[in-house]
Image: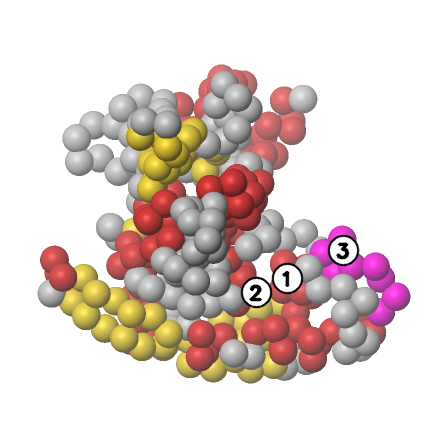
Amino acid sequence: MDSFDDQIQGQMSIADLFEPPEKLFAVSRIFARARKSMSLAEQKTFVYALSEMRFTEEAQSDCVKLDKKTLAGILGITTADTGHLSVNLYDEIKELPRHSYIEINEKDLGLCSNGFIITAVTRFKNVIRLRFNREYLGLFTGLTSDYLTMWSADIFQMKSKRSVQFYEFLRQKTDTRKDVNSEGLGIRAFKELFDIPETGEGSYMRSAEQGGFNRSRFEQQVIQPLCEDLKNCRMINLIAQSDGKLYEKVKRGNRVAGYRFYWTFTSHPAIASAEEVHEIRKAVDADPKVLKVAKDLVDGKKKPKKNSFSNFEQRDYDFDNLEAQLLRMQNNLK
């Protein structure tokens, strides 16, 4: 059998050959709030691993195997990088255990913990294996409440670590009962979120002679790249303002003090829209479970009853199977 390198030799790009997986994954809100230090490639690899888990199930292995070809596509590794893509792929993520260190400080819960999420990365012939620290496996599996779902394909298409952080931040701020969400951040809040220094190199402060904050450069290098990365997301959908920008400047007098973002939320981007599902329900004698999902999608437009789960947010469905059935029915109607 051809090796991983032999199978892709002569191709322009792995990303052109393999579609990245589009799946829901989930993390505890405790993990979402924790301080993390993974690189962009490491974050995408970590998300790929989470998307291979079933986040509502408790008894799971602490090891997750990732297909090398799929991972190379997610990370955008091409044959131009090196003749030994398998080695190059491993080099991108071999420091993941060290960079998976997190700091949890939940004062309201009386919980503080520091540790490493990933304990080992191992390269085999056709797969990369990640071993999770069982101490923290409960942050990603057996989840029944107080967690966030996210869409893997949204993160795979991002070009910066900051964009992944901001996506996660907006997801934390999302009220799934609202048609439109909004959140404003001041300059200081952005600096804290992205660990931008207050002064000196990289702080976006002008020289001592010029003085003041360089807002124009901050917008060009921070705000606009965030919007560029998030504009094609399917779970978090930024709303353009009257000037066409995906953010609104917040002013105090004549000075820009921060930026406000508006977005809509799609709980499960892969499944057909409520209108399409409604037509499917009328035309097809569907499986009862599929009809239940269809009903949830339609009812999801209404404000949920008190203490009820948000549509799809905290329900134990086999999403992949139901999605496939819905899409098959949708194609049959065409």
- Binning the other alpha carbons within 10 Å of mark 2 as few (below 14), some (14 to 19) or many (20 upward) gives many
**Residue 141 image point, x, y percent:** 34, 62
Q: CA distance from mark 2 to mark 1?
A: 6 Å
Q: Which numbered mark, 3 or 2, is in the foreground of this view?
A: 2
On the image, numbered disc 1 is attached to which residue? 75
**Residue 151 image point, x, y percent:** 48, 47
Mark 3 residue type? Leu
Q: Is residue 282 visible?
A: yes
Where is residue 7, by image quadrant?
bottom right
Q: Earlier in the sequence, mark 3 or mark 1?
A: 3
Answer whether labels 2 and 1 touch (C-beta < 8 Å): yes
On the image, numbered disc 3 is attached to which residue? 17
Which residue sits at x=78%, y=74%? 82
Residue bounds of the magenta highlight: 9-16
Q: Secondary structure at mark 2?
A: helix
**Residue 235 image point, x, y percent:** 47, 39
Drawn side of residue 119 relative to residue 15, left or right: left
* Closer to the camera in the image, 41 or 3: 41
Which residue sits at x=48%, y=63%? 201
Where is residue 232, by image quadrant?
top right
Mark 2 residue type? Ala
